[in-house]
Amino acid sequence: MSAMWLAITRRDLLLARRRRVEALLPLGFFVLAAGLFPIGVSPEPQMLRQIAPGVVWVCALLAAMLSVTQMFSSDHLDGSLEQMLLAPQSLVALVAGKVLAHWLSSGLPLVLVSPLIGLMFDMDARSIGAMTASLLLGTPILSLLGAVGAALTLGLRSGAALVFLVVLPLTVPALIFGTGAVGAVAAGLSPQAHLSLLGALLIVSGLAAPLATAAALRISLE
Amino acid sequence: MKWTTYAAPSRFYALAGRLTPWCWAAAALFGLAGLWTGFAIAPTDFQQGDAYRIIFIHVPAAWMSMVIYLAMAFWAAWGWMLNARMASMYARALAPTGALFTFVALWTGAFWGKPTWGTWWVWDARLTSEFILLMLYLGYIALTEAIDDPRRSANAGALLALVGAVNIPVIYFSVKWWNTLHQGSTISVGAAPKMVATMLTAMLLMTLSFWAYSFAVAFTRARAVVLEQESEAEWVRGL
């Protein structure tokens, strides 16, 4: 089972590497969208510091939803997804592999770039640390929940827009605890409680979301 | 007669048709009684004046918004697991009513908030989670409407409703820890209600009225869904 898992992850990562620009599009969106806020709201450092965690998190949410429809669509178009469903190996493992590949190719870059955005928003080092930690725990949740939405809207005309409406309400707890961690640091408290809750969310969605995604794929392709 | 008798769309169609007028009658009767008790008999609140009377619509609507989501998720899951088409159709018929009550709860809450809190909207725990509930309803409706195949539409909707139902407590508590301003609940099971008996009576009458209304509308909509999805069946052409 773990062999299948890693094989799928390696395959998807290889595919992402072959289409490098396409794979980096969410990252470009993330940086651009975050960069629009100082222009749109105010360049005051005080204000920027205050809105930074929310801006970074919301942009990460949107960037994840933007890329998550790619997870199954090309495999669906060329028919390989149906073969994967027919394979004797567990579909849940396959989904987990695809989610891991999605996170490594589009979630992790966001985490790595977020400290730079923090600097552009004049955050101090401890807040940047908390924000990066919260994104490190939070972006896999977005990939996991996004996979459910992507599987449900597979092949639909308005699939890309539907994913936003279907998945975003479910990501609210992650957003709250993620930005809460940074808020706690800014208030001089420890971010540990928020990060623990975020970790709990990650464990629960890591256990439940691949099952739900597998069920959704079967519904969509039966 | 077995318990699955009315799982057949044709029999459900006939039963719902017979029940609908009674539901409408009950909705009107309880509604009139509730409005009369609430607006004519119940005393004016010494702190909030007459503005509080919106709760006779607000609180039952908020209750209904949550109950209907659970009912919808239940019937959708039932239809998915037991492959019962009628249950799926009924779940689909419930969704717009649930969304409507969620919207009414938010709307009347804004009307109550303006004179009482001095603002139309605050991002407190209950308003925010009710707002997210509205988004969950809209997501469900959008998803089921976007899929043309009825079976896939019903099952995908069921999965989404279940994921949403599991998430509702998580969303509620996370939002609650995030921020809170809403007044504590006035009615809770096991504690004496902190309000005059007439106010409670009015609220319960309005709740019964909303229940009856929900049944009436959901039955009517379910009948329409049945006709749409069974348009090829013999009995529909015989109508």
Image (tube, coloured by chain):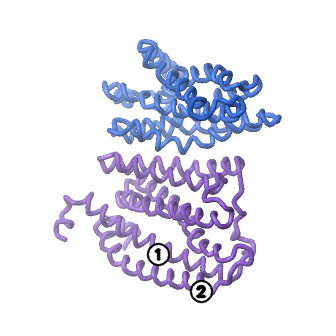
Chain colours: A blue, B purple
Between the C-alphas of marks 2 and 1, the distance is 23 Å
Q: Quadrant of residue B231?
A: bottom left
Tag nearer the camera, 2 or 1: 2
Q: Can residue A60 be seen from the camera position used here?
A: no
Q: Which residue is mark 2?
A: B40
Q: Which residue is mark 1?
A: B212
Classify mark 2: residues with Cα within 10 Å, few (<14), some (14-19) or many (20+): few
Q: Is residue B74 above or below residue A24?
A: below
Mark 1 belongs to which amino acid? Answer: Ala
Mark 2 belongs to which amino acid? Answer: Ala
The one nearer the camera, A116 or A180, is A116
Q: On what subunit does the disc labeled 1 rest? A: B
> How many marks are shown on the rendered structure?
2
The one nearer the camera, B150 or A128, is A128
- Residue at position x 50%, y 50% from top? B135
- Residue at position x 81%, y 34% from top? A190
Q: Is residue B136 above or below residue A67?
A: below
* The furthest residue to the bottom: B41
Mark 1 secondary-structure assignment? helix
Mark 2 or mark 1: whose residue is earlier in sequence: 2
Classify mark 1: residues with Cα within 10 Å, few (<14), some (14-19) or many (20+): many
Q: Which mark is residue A14?
A: none
Q: On what subunit does the disc labeled 2 rest? A: B
Q: Can residue A150 be seen from the camera position used here?
A: yes
